[in-house]
Image: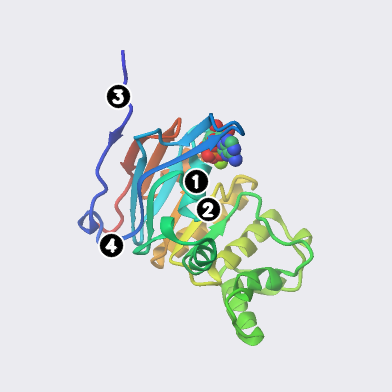
Amino acid sequence: MITPMAEVQPTPGPAANPRWGSPIAELIGVTKTYYKPDGSVLVEAVGRSGRGVDLTVPRGQYLAIMGASGSGKSTLMNMLGCLDRPTSGSYLLDGHDVSVMADTELSSYRGRKIGFVFQAFNLIPELTVLENVEVPLLYQGISRGERRARAMDKLELVGLADRTGHRPRELSGGQQQRTAIARALVTEPVILMADEPTGNLDSATGESILRVIEQLHASGMTIIMVTHDDRISERCERIFRLKDGLVESDRFVKVRGA
Ligand SMILES: Nc1ncnc2c1ncn2[C@@H]1O[C@H](COP(=O)(O)OP(=O)(O)OP(=O)(O)O)[C@@H](O)[C@H]1O
Ligand SMILES: [Mg+2]
């Protein structure tokens, strides 16, 4: 029996959940292909030739990207986070087509719009907690005093105000991920993106990180999170599932407040 590849529901508009607003991130026919040095195709990591992936994320949505290992989750997330460019298709981020932006314009736009949290925390070991959180502001021409104040504000938000002078190696895994979340938030991004943010943490610590993310969502933040874990994705509002780089399903889990 041949199983239909995708049962994709159209993304509901704002009416589906009064908390969702206009589209903040819109992938249109996006593909990502890796090539061998001789120019032949190595991997079609997302989409296929002539069949790209569409994904519209409304403001305020809490979305999980799921799928087996190698299905293209990180590749898709890196394009959403402007860490990587699509091979084809376009990407509208907060109303601007980033697929046509030059590299310097793109990195500055990305810095203002997106906070990114990685599975492996990616903190700078030589810097203190406070300095790590200040890093994204260094590129924005903000005074030292203002940088300190804004970094402190986010460290208070994630419950780390008493660890500002520690180095990352002097923190627990959960504290390192909180620091990384504070760093992601310090530029006041419109979207928080997280690729397996609890993947390196035990379940109790992972739970505390999820609660931080859920609080941010409750305060109106758009969240896009890659996860392997059904228990985590069931707490999101929507599960976008990939299989071999294509959309397998797009499911709305729960509609809070609707
Ligand atoms: N830089 C690269 N060069 C070549 N192939 C790549 C590259 N990055 C990813 N791929 C391939 O693209 C496919 C999708 O990879 P991706 O990292 O997006 O998967 P994933 O769903 O995030 O998997 P995991 O759950 O293991 O993190 C895989 O087949 C992978 O081998
Ligand atoms: Mg991955």
Count neighbours of disc 1 (C-alpha within 10 A) and say few if under 14, some if 14 to 19, many if 20 or more.
many
Instruction: Say if 49 sits above or below 185 in the image.
Output: above
Q: Is residue 190 left or right of residue 165?
A: left
User: Mark 2 CB in 8 Å range of ligand 2?
Assistant: no
Residue 63 at what x, y percent from top left?
40, 50
Q: Of 67 and 109, which appears nearest the observer? A: 109
Q: Tag on residue 194?
A: 2
Q: Identify the residue position indicated by label 3 in the image.
A: 4
Residue bearing mark 4: 22
Residue at image location 46% in from the left, 43% down from the top: 87
Lower sequence index among marks 4 and 3: 3
Disc 2 crowd, CA 10 A, few/some/many (<14, 14-19, 20+): many
Label 4: which secondary element: loop
Q: Amino acid at mark 2?
A: Ala
- Residue sitting at 31 percent across and 31 percent down? 6
Where ligand 2 lies, by quadrant? Answer: top right
Nearer the viewer's eye, disc 1 or disc 3?
Answer: 3
Name the secondary structure under disc 1: strand
Give x and y (percent) for residue 21: 28, 63
Please report contact status of discs 2 and 1: CB closer than 8 Å, yes or no. yes
The Cα–Cα distance between marks 2 and 1, rounded to whole angstroms, is: 6 Å
Q: Position of residue 249 (x, y in %)?
A: 34, 35
Query: Residue 226: which numbered mark, if any?
Result: 1
In front: label 2 or label 3: 3
Quadrant for the C terminus, please.
Answer: bottom left
